[in-house]
Image (cartoon, grey):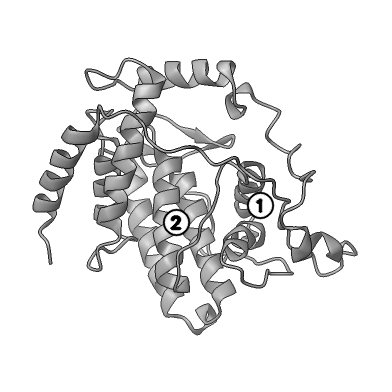
Amino acid sequence: MIPITKLIRAFKRFLSKVIHAPPQGKAVAPGTWTCLRTTKPDATATARDDASRLKTSGSSCAKTLDNKDPKLRDGPMASKHRWKQVQSFGLQLGVGSLDEYERRTAFGAAAAQVFLRQPTTDAFQLVTIRLVHRINFEPVYPWAGDFRTPGQLATIGGYVAADAGRIEAELDLLYQQSQDWRHEQTARSVADRAAMVAFFHARFERIHPFRDGNGRLGRLLLSEHLCRLCGRRSNIDWLAIRSCYLAGLAAADGGDLGPLANLFLASLNEPLIRRAYQSPFRIAPGMDTPE
């Protein structure tokens, strides 16, 4: 087993060499996806669940969240808002533009991914969550890896995140809930395991432990969770499915993990869930008892 301190030092050396390197590669044009909804027992719109609609244009969920808030759209307005936002969190010296911020976090994400893929890394544990955030965001934030402190409030999708004083307890509870689910017989199928990943991801985002970077960190963890629980890596284009992803998170807030799990199942070319998939635990922080 490679000591964590040695890994961190190696990552820092790696980042110091490449942090000012010119960006390479070319962005792939995103495709268009439709929402992967679950049907209700008495619903007549089963056709909406048909996997043949997976990669068609005219997404029915594109209207749900994408056009309501300028912060959710691409373009100069969104970039200006985002740059003001990251500046308010307190940046490392040398981060003078949003492009520089994005470049550094991209390199940090690559280093964090290397760490997550170590066989001895438990991608569900609190200590791992903090360390991955630190590796990913230390190039831009001096406080990377530190949870929110009292007075640092956060909201996600209009919901209030966990109180700062409860963050560690909430993440410990999330870890225990996930472990219990993993060891139950109900998590036998790929669909069950994808639903468990959806639960962890949705609840993590509702806890929102850090001042910034929760979404990126959550998706990094999610990719590793899918690999370890479902046996292979997915290739999700988050920009292409953004509207459906936000709609899936909203459905999970209401207790139905199906739409979010279906996004993951589609990326693995697995059959979709064609019913409401009720979460065995509450998603909202501070509500610890099962539904």
Say what secondary structure mark 1 lies in: helix
Label 1 vs 2, first from the N-terminus: 2
Q: Who is closer to the viewer here, 100 or 149?
A: 100
State the residue position of label 2: 222
Q: Is residue 278 above or below residue 244?
A: below
For the C terminus, give its image quadrant: bottom right
Q: Who is closer to the viewer here, 24 or 172?
A: 24
Distance from Cα at disc 1 to Cα at disc 2: 17 Å
Give the crowd class for mark 2: few <14, some 14-19, many >=20 residues within 10 Å: many
Position of 182 compared to 186: left or right? left
State the residue position of label 1: 251
Residue in view at x 63 percent, y 63 percent: 266
Q: Amino acid at mark 2?
A: Leu
Q: Toward which corner of the image does residue 104 lie, by quadrant?
A: top left
Q: Position of residue 156 (x, y in %)?
A: 53, 37
Residue in view at x 44 percent, y 57 percent: 223
Q: Is residue 159 above or below residue 204?
A: above
